[in-house]
Amino acid sequence: MATLIQANTSVGTAEKKKTGSDAGPAQDAPTPCRWRGNRLQSPGPSTRAASSFTWSSTGSSAPESSAHGGAPSSIASTSSGGATKTAKLCIALGVALAVVGIASSPLLRRTAGRQKQLAQDSPGLETSPKSPAVRTLRETVVAALASRGSRTAVLDVLAGVPAEFGTAAVASGLPARRSRYTARMAAANMGTEEEEELVDTVLQLLAPTAATWPAALRARLTAALQVSPQLSEACIVAGISDSSMEAKRGLARPLPMQVVNEFTSAGARSSGWLHQKILNLAAATGLSSYGFRASLYQSMPAAVVADDSPAIAAGDCLALRGNSSVALRILGLDGSAGSAFVHHIVIEQPPRWALPRIRASPRHFCVMGETVEARADPYSVPLGSFEYLLAAPAVQAFVLRQTSIPLRGLQLHFRGPGWGEQYFCIYRIRAYTAPPPSCSGVRLAETVAL
């Protein structure tokens, strides 16, 4: 009986040591794997101290019994707590070694390096690999390039960078070399190596350091990525099917116009007078091959700028030299002379990658209007001065100043030599009564930020 009382007393003493305020050694220390909610709050005492097994000095285990007395029970509790701490320390050490091994892998180092470089280029972006800002930027670019309108506009911008920004582009590290391969990128499909190269180029331009990249280029590239896919597809479908879908979708349709030869400069030739004489003599023989070769060095008729067909083929344009002008008359629905409240005009050129000479494009020009009452001096109303850009979409809209005056004609005065070639080509000129965006051929025309 005394033995039983002593055993019960020992068990009670052991339980008191487990639950009392001085039972510090038996309480588990907080570990990162056990933190929940407040990271400063430690977990409660471990229940593993009441385990039915204790560790012996030889590494074997033996069942715990109250018959051994209070002292062995206390030792078993302390040994169990120490074993638990040892096991958790081993687990924590293993997890730490695994994390270090993963972090030192080459793939993760390359990913972290790209994230760090992107964060240095754009201080507003987070450096974490899980940063939503970085993921959103790349996903936005990929989604925009999946649209035919944005993709074409972006390629136009990249192709015109070396021609417009010149040596400054190369000195600033712009992708001048990559822009020479925009034709290959235009034919590439989503998910290819060229597509990844294009996405990386756009990301570099959108997240640059302030002192390296021109702000105007970034603004144009951002606008190109924001071309409406719905409106762009509507223009493509309308241009291919020759339907009036533009009016149904709320897009402005161009006014019917014809060229006034009396106030339009003569077309230029792309070679000297001696070469032209030789070509003319060869063409006079009547052989079609010589006639075709002679036509390659001569401008198309001026009426081509008012043609309804899209500007797609290179050379299907009016070539001009020096200071030149193009006059247009607005027509009515029946083909006779008419008038309209012209809001903006559009200069439509082929895609940049389809042109052998990007610099053979117009640059500075002004627009004059012919009012209904005009007699002696037909084109006397100034409507604005503009600049056609190269590192921008090939189809550009220009909003006129006087939009509340009915006009029956327009005249565009171009200042030579354009962007540096001996001649420049005008492919299509269109006029609209509604604000942009508008359909021009199969392209969506919008104003370009300078």
Image (cartoon, rainbow, N blue to C red):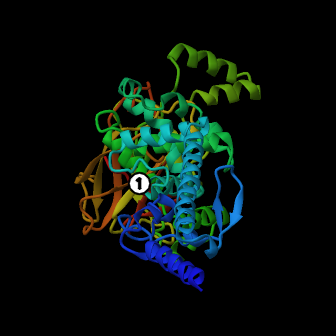
Q: Which residue is mark 1?
A: 223
Helix, strand or loop at mark 1: helix
Which of the two residues, 14 or 336, is positioned nearer the viewer here?
14
Q: Residue at x 35, y 26 (%)?
A: 168
Q: Residue furthest bottom?
A: 1
Left or right: residue 438 compared with residue 449: right
Q: Image height check: is 310 above or below 54?
A: above
Q: Position of residue 225 (x, y in %)?
A: 47, 54
Q: Quadrant of residue 209?
A: top left
Image quadrant assignment for residue 388: top left
Q: Position of residue 149 (x, y in %)?
A: 55, 56
308 and 112: which is toward the camera: 112
Give the left or right position of residue 416, taking residue 311 as reference: left
Closer-to-camera residue (409/127): 127
Amino acid type, label 1: Ala
Residue 166 spot, x, y in % from top left: 39, 26
| Residue 146 appears in the rendering | yes
The answer to whether 84 is drawn above or below residue 389 in the figure is below
The residue at 41%/68% (across/down) is: 23
Q: Residues within 10 Å of mark 1 (few under 14, many from 20)?
A: some
Nearer the observer, 327 or 169? 169
Q: How many marks?
A: 1
**Picture quarter with the N terminus:** bottom right
